[in-house]
Amino acid sequence: MNRPHRRDHNSVPIGRRVAELRARRGMSQQAFADRLGKSKSWVDKIERGVRRLDRYSVIREIADVLRLDPDLLLGPRQPPPTAPSLDGVDGVRAALARYHDRPQRTGTADQTRRQVAYAWMAYQHARYPHLLDALPALLDAARGTRSLLVSTYRITAAVLIKLDHPDLAWLAADRAVTAAAGPTLTATATISVAQALRALGHHPLALAAALTAADTADDPAVRGTLYLQAGLAAASSGDRRNTDDLLHHAAALADRHTSDTDPHHTGFGPAAVQVARFVAAHHLGDTTEAIQHHVHAINSDGWRRLPPEHRAAHLIDAAHTFLDTGDATQAGQALLHADRIAPAEVRDRPAVRTFLAQLIQRGPAAADVARLATIVGLTRQP
């Protein structure tokens, strides 16, 4: 007789797990309901998945009645993922310090070009620990080709901003501009400069740098992205008039931008403009308007064409906005949505882990949020 295939515990819905564990205890639905102080109908709906079991406090009560650890209901505890380590950042720092060295060729220019393209894809899928490991060698290999070196410096700056190293990101961005030649490369490098300056809180400098480069950029997507960076810098400075004007210019370019190709890895388009409008409204304190832009962005035709990193980062920003309005449930759902799209965007970024801890501390958390906190190694609150 063939043995039945063993199911993955994580693949079984939580209601079904409750039913199975109750049955193992030889407990009827009525007896189980009595011990919980619930109706038999409530138990039946939970076990059939008609009613969501989404509060950790209730899960803990069920676990107490069944005399088991709540993690058996939530799913087995997983070790926290390895966050990008200090050693990885130190490796990038050491590679940046070798900029006077001769290029250390480990392959042909075509091989390096493919490696840079793969690094962009890894960034757009938020594979930050992997990138930290790969970037030192890639920075060395790319030094023989100016365009590849600019791209690699841009990727480096973007990753370092994500991992809360804005000073080092500024260094990489500045190196990108230094390595650039011609208006297009210089303008694309300046996108990274503006992002790093914004991360450092130098918003007027970011605004000036982005506008100067936008005036000379000959690629509409690059120019539009620079307008977005300038608009976000203006919003962070409380300059509503400039914000509206710059984002309007970006929107006009996005409406005329019909190409599906993105050779400069900007992610520019109407959805990117909507996301930027959301961020700007949030910075300006217009919470209701920000949420409207959020809803419009995630329901737009271009939403799924944004890179996973961009979508997940937006959802994390939306979670902050929802929590600011006191809506911890929506904040948790936005964070979980981001985790499904690009897990490392949630689990490897220090600022997001801090936000998740704050969300958990607000009170009873939804079961899936509690599980996420467990996965990343945070203390779960009852």
Image: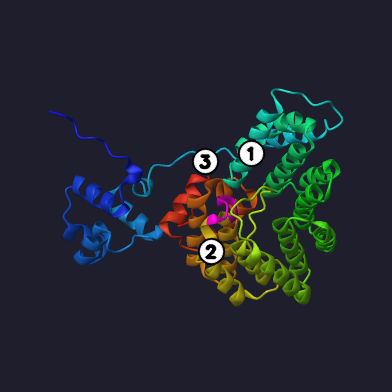
| Residue 254, horizontal then vertical, whole percent | 65, 64
Q: What secondary structure is found at the residue carrying circle 2?
A: loop
Residue lying farthest to the left in this orientation: 1
Going by the numbered disc 3, the residue's amino acid type is: Pro
Q: Is residue 369 above or below residue 241?
A: above
Q: Which mark is residue 362?
A: 2
Q: Which mark is residue 80?
A: 3
The Cα–Cα distance between marks 3 and 2, rounded to whole angstroms, is 22 Å
Question: What's the residue at 74%, 71% (across, down)?
Answer: 243
Q: Which mark is residue 117?
A: 1
Is residue 282 found inside the magenta-colored segment of the image?
A: no
Q: Is residue 218 visible?
A: yes
| Residue 111, horizontal then vertical, whole percent | 66, 28
Question: What's the residue at 79%, 37% (across, down)?
Answer: 146
The Cα–Cα distance between marks 1 and 3, rounded to whole angstroms, is 29 Å
Question: What's the residue at 71%, 69% (across, down)?
Answer: 247
Q: Is residue 69 above or below residue 97?
A: below
State left or right for residue 125 relative to residue 60.
right
In depth, the one of 155 and 111 nearer the eye is 111
Going by the numbered disc 1, the residue's amino acid type is: Ala
* Mark nearer the N terminus (1 vs 3): 3
